[in-house]
Image: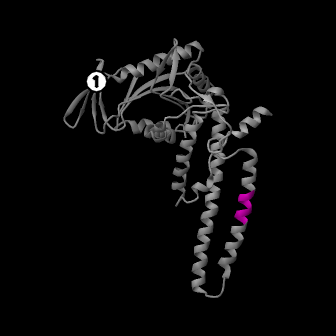
Amino acid sequence: MAQLIKLQDYISRYETDIYHYPARFVRLKKQQWESTRQYWESNRWGEVMEALSLEGREEEPGDPGVMQKLKSFFQRGKKEEGMQEAAVAKENEPSMFETVELASAANLEELKQEFLNQLFTFQVKWASSTVREKSYIDPKYFHDERLRFFLQGLPDSFLLLYEPVLRLKNAPMELDVILLTPTEAWCLTFLEEEEQSVYIGSTERFWVKRNGGKESRVLSPVLAVSRMEAILKKLFQRQEIDFPIRKAIISRNGFIDYPSAPFSLEVMDSRTFPVWFNRMRSMSSPLKTIQLKAAKSVLDVGQTTSVRRPEWDADNDFLFKSETEDQEG
């Protein structure tokens, strides 16, 4: 799952220490998944054994038989193992969320999806709060399909800035999407207003959009993506960061006809986007130092709107307490 390091002008844990939190997130995610999977398998095993035991009783009434003994043995062993693991996990890190909430999944694939859904909510919260401060989140981001799609579909080593607000020359500037992979930075803008729309690209300030016989004009996305590229170039140059920058216009639900597109611009629509996205998904490279430096150069100019946190709220601080203990120690 990609990491959301900046959302709008919300305060982010990553901007307080970009060299610490990405690796911390990966470790917490791995620990939580193992705990969740083992908890789920333990409960599923109990259900299977119960069913087998009932079948055995039907065949041999009055005799608990071997199945009942096996059930008791394995349930006891799983319970003891689960208690030991829970104790170790509690000592090391509080959970990202309650594993019991995922115990009802019908199969492993459903469990993975429920796990990712809760992890998505966790990511949005982590990208809008720190130990001492928090920002008020627009509820729309918890239901943002595009944000969820990119976070859940890309590897842990990818860092995402979603509609970040940067302060440049004392003026706030909202960008679209910046994706920092271990090897390059992607400036992304989207044309996804209506399903099955056809966008006719040109060098003009406006493009033509056609949908169901209707025709209208949209502002050329080249302007937005080129502006992002220019900003990243300046920020990287200022910090002497040699990190490739790519730019792309994307329409996952439509078509783009732009035969005269510059060589440096990727144009991806519903026909070609899946190929690019699958290539990104299959990237196995870990986080890189140069990638984190690039992220820091952007986060350093990010605008932040936040307030001091009130007393600990158990609903929002499900994994934050250990950090304050580390700092106080």
Quadrant of the rendered structure where residue 301 is?
A: top right
**Which is nearer the eye, 272 or 79?**
79
| 176 left or right of 48 in image | left
Q: What element does badge 1 sit on?
A: strand
- Give the color scheme: rainbow, by chain, secondary structure or one colour: one colour
Q: Is residue 290 above or below residue 118?
A: above
- Which three-letter amino acid code belongs to the residue tagged 1? Trp
The residue at 70%/77% (across/down) is 69
Q: How far from the left and from the top, in percent, is residue 111?
A: 54, 54
- Identity of the residue furthest to the front in this view: 310
- Identity of the residue furthest to the right in this view: 329
Dot 1 crowding, Cα within 10 Å, few <14, some 14–19, many 20+:
some
Q: How far from the left and from the top, in percent, is residue 325?
A: 76, 37
Q: Is residue 125 above or below residue 234?
A: below
Judging by the rendered image, the residue that carries numbered circle 1 is: 207
Q: How far from the left and from the top, in percent, is residue 23?
A: 65, 35
Q: Which residues are magenta?
A: 77-83
Q: How far from the left and from the top, in percent, is residue 35?
A: 66, 52
